[in-house]
Image (cartoon, helix red, strand yellow):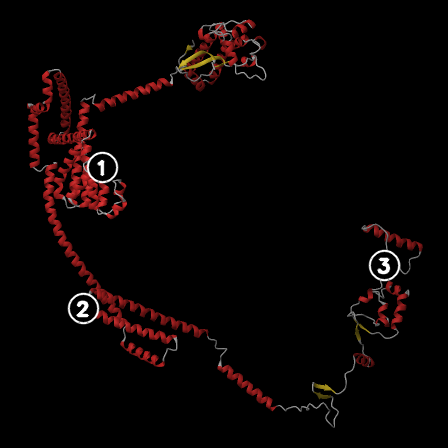
């Protein structure tokens, strides 16, 4: 579960208005905290030779099933530090990591519901990988990296936000 | 596509659904409140006060409508029927469930159009039937009927009441009304007996209750406000309303308990009577009736008393109208007299104009002129015609004057007006003719000015004739020459130089040739010039001189003469030859240039320096060789 923060969006606005330097520094600090996860996650992706040959992207492919390409899959793993739009439950994400390609998501989550399927069995036989996490947070690349991060990134993000808020308060305090 | 996203940190800012839910909840709350007010679930003090306000407003509007109808009826001469009309409208609204707010304007429109109470009531009944049957609103139907009564059937045809345009054109209004009455008979009654009609009746009753209560409240306000303290009155009203509310609620509770009792039904059935006979309410009603009776008897502001007053007023008004009609007749008579007076004044004015232009002497003179013109047969000029026309116009004016005098004596206004018009017309004609005469005079003066006096001047002609006569006298004094008779033979005894021939005078000796004349000139030492075939004139030279000049040309001496400046120009020796006519000098000198010396120089083309150098070199070579003759270089 993500850590819920109050006033982070307002904080960003205040930083942008009153302390532009802190407004620029905050995303950088958050990015520095998120980057290790994405880097590790990319490292967990198998090479093209390590996935099933029929899954690899090839010319004249007529199939609609998403094919796997290591370059595209790696490029699809990233992070964002800008607040998102509210979801249906009214939450806005302040910092997030994602694996947005279809093939990367397939590799990430395959075997959650049907670990004995032929596709999963064959892929695991060709390139041994481990799933980490629980429930919807279970996966082979991004979730695994997040799990192995042990909350360091989350703590760093929260610390960065808190730090920015503290600095903003310090600067805005009138000293008599 | 399932996106794999891990939110590291997030913030709850609220979803749209929540704001929508909040807004919907607030709307629902408002709606429930409104619904509660509308269905009377929240029947509290505010509701009672609101009902009181609406009642007062309804009562005021009803009173205003009654007054407007009474005024309209009074204006069309039906003021005495105001009370009966109001009663008729009340009966209609209770019978057909149509509110009086609709009936009054309809009745008013029909009354204004027809001017008859019975006709208005008949047409209003018909309108109610048509409205109930066709679904058209009562206002449209009454409007169409009132227009049809006044002759315009267009609106009636648009109502779709089943009458063709041909029938509308052919039939009278009474026939159309009878047909409509047959077609829509009983429609309003039938509609009133339906469930909807019952509801309408309930609505009418509710409105009447509201109006009645409103009238009561107005009267109560008047009674409460007698001390001038409106705050006290309003406070007491609030207290009364609250008490009424509590009483109503308490009574409702009691009635609900009575429902369970056997006697409840009977009690409820006769609840109206019980309510009416309860001592406190009976006392209130008795007091109210007393107040109303005293109010009506005292002629205070109230609908019945006002209607009675209107009836009395209408009787007086009828008398006034009768008097007004008499006055109108008198006014018409007065207007006729005034018209006659005006005509007489106009006639006198025209007579004055006619007297100014009438001149008896002039008429007599002009009449004589006309007679003279008739004796002559026809007028000889336009001016005479114009004069005759003027005289005729004057005579016509005189006739008109006499006719007008006769009309004035008879006292007939129309005849006076006609004679005056005729006189004015003839005066205009006379004025136009006089203006024409002036124009003719002006034209004549212009034409006289255009005549040329120099061309037809008798003095000049006489002077010229006198000169001619003098000249003839002088010629007569000159001696007449002796003209030889045309015989062709010389007169005898003389040697005349000329002789008379049939073709004129001719010399006696024959004419000499040019050669003979030139020879004669040369004999006396003169110089004879000759014109050659080429048109060049030259002088003949003495014989032998041409040979001499040819020798001179061929000799070296010629060059010497040129070098020494004695002979400035070369000469043409050929021109001295006798074979060419032999002349020393020609008038044009063109023959002096037919013997030229040409030098051919072989050098570059177009380079003047090269040419000059080549010429110089040739001459220098000749000098060096010693072959250059006759000149120094």
Tell me where residue B53 appears, x and y as whole percent: 18, 29
Tell me: B436 left or right of B216. Answer: right
Give SS at disc 3. loop
Out of B210 and B223, give the one closest to the viewer: B210
Closer to the N terminus: mark 1 or mark 2?
1
Q: Nearer the viewer, mark 1 or mark 2?
A: 1
Relative vertical location of residue B201 with respect to residue B261 in this rendering, above or below: below
Q: Determine which residue is flagged by label 1.
A: B131
CA separation in Å, label 3 and label 1:
137 Å
In the rendered view of the protein, which quadrant contains the C terminus of chain B?
Answer: bottom right
- Callouts 3 and 2 on one subunit: yes
Quarter of image, res B161: top left
Contact flag, marks 3 and 2 (Cβ < 8 Å) = no
Q: How dense is the environment of label 1, judged by Cα within 10 Å: few (below 14), some, or many (20 and up)?
A: many
Relative vertical location of residue B50 with respect to residue B513 in this rendering, above or below: above
Q: Which mark is residue B598?
A: 3
Tell me: B440 left or right of B179. Answer: right
Q: Determine which residue is flagged by label 2.
A: B410
Out of B529 and B494, give the one closest to the viewer: B494
């Amino acid at each position: 579960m993500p850590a819920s923060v109050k006033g982070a969006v307002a904080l960003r606005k205040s930083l942008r208005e009153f302390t532009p330097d802190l407004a620029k520094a905050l995303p950088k600090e958050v990015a520095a905290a998120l980057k290790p996860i994405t880097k590790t996650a990319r490292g967990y992706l198998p090479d093209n030779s390590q996935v099933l040959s029929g899954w690899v992207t090839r010319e004249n492919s007529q199939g609609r099933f998403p094919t796997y390409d290591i370059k595209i899959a790696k490029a699809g793993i990233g992070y964002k530090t800008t607040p998102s739009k509210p979801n249906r439950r009214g939450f806005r994400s302040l910092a997030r990591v994602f694996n947005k390609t279809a093939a990367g998501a397939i590799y990430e989550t395959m075997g959650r519901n049907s670990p004995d399927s032929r596709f999963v069995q064959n892929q695991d036989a060709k390139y041994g990988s481990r799933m980490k996490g629980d429930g919807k947070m279970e996966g082979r690349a991004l979730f695994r990296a997040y799990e192995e991060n042990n909350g360091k990134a989350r703590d760093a993000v929260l610390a960065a936000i808190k730090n920015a808020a503290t600095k903003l308060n310090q600067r805005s305090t009138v000293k008599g | 596509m399932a996106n794999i996203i891990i939110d590291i940190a997030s913030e709850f800012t609220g979803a749209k659904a929540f704001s929508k839910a909040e807004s919907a909840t607030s709307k629902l709350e408002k709606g429930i409140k409104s619904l509660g007010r509308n269905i009377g679930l929240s029947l509290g003090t505010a509701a009672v006060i609101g009902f009181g306000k609406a009642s007062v407003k309804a009562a005021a509007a009803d009173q205003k409508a009654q007054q407007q109808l009474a005024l309209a009826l009074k204006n069309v001469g039906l003021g005495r029927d105001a009370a009966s009309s109001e009663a008729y409208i009340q009966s209609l609204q209770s019978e057909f469930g149509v509110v009086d707010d609709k009936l009054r304007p309809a009745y008013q429109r029909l009354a204004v159009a027809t001017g008859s109470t019975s006709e208005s009531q008949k047409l209003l009944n018909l309108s109610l039937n048509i409205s109930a049957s066709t679904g058209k609103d009562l206002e449209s139907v009454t409007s169409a009927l009132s227009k049809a009564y006044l002759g315009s059937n267009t609106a009636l045809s648009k109502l779709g009441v089943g009458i063709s345009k041909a029938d509308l054109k052919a039939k009278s209004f009474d026939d159309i009304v009878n047909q409509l009455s047959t077609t829509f008979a009983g429609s309003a009654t039938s509609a009133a007996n339906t469930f909807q009609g019952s509801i309408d009746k309930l609505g009418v009753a509710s409105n009447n209750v509201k109006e009645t209560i409103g009238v009561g409240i107005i009267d109560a306000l008047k009674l409460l406000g007698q001390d001038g303290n409106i705050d006290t009155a309003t406070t007491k009203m609030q207290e009364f309303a609250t008490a009424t509310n509590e009483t109503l609620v308490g009574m409702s509770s009691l009635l609900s308990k009575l429902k369970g009792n056997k006697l409840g039904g009977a009690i409820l059935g006769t609840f109206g009577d019980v309510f009416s006979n309860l001592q406190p309410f009976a006392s209130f009603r008795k007091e109210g009736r007393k107040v109303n009776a005293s109010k009506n008897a005292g002629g205070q502001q109230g609908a019945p008393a006002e209607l009675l007053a209107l009836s009395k007023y209408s009787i007086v008004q009828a008398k006034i109208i009768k008097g007004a009609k008499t006055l109108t007749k008198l006014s018409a008579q007065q207007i006729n007299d005034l018209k006659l007076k005006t005509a007489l004044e106009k006639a006198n004015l025209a007579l004055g104009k006619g007297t100014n232009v009438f001149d008896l002497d002039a008429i007599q003179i002009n009449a004589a002129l006309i007679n003279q013109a008739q004796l002559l047969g026809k007028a000889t000029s336009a001016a005479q015609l114009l004069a005759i026309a003027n005289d005729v116009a004057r005579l016509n004016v005189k006739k008109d004057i006499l006719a007008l005098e006769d009309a004035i004596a008879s006292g007939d206004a129309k005849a006076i007006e006609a004679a005056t018009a005729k006189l004015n017309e003839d005066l205009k004609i006379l004025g136009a003719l006089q203006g024409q005469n002036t124009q003719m005079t002006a034209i004549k003066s212009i034409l006289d000015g255009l005549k040329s006096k120099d061309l037809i001047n008798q003095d000049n002609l006489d002077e010229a004739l006198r000169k001619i006569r003098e000249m003839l006298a002088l010629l007569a004094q000159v001696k007449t020459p002796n003209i030889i008779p045309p015989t062709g033979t010389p007169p005898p005894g003389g040697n005349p130089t000329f002789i008379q021939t049939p073709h004129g005078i001719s010399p006696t000796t024959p004419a000499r040739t040019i050669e003979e004349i030139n020879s004669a000139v040369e004999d006396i030492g003169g110089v004879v010039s000759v014109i050659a075939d080429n048109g060049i004139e030259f002088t003949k030279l003495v014989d032998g001189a041409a040979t001499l000049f040819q020798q001179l040309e061929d000799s070296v001496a010629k060059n010497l003469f040129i070098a020494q400046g004695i002979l400035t120009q070369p000469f043409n020796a050929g021109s001295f030859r006798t074979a060419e006519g032999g002349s020393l000098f020609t008038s044009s000198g063109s023959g002096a240039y037919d013997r030229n010396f040409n030098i051919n120089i072989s050098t570059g083309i177009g380079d003047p320096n090269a040419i000059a150098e080549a010429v110089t070199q040739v001459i220098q070579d000749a000098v060096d060789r010693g072959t250059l003759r006759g000149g120094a270089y």
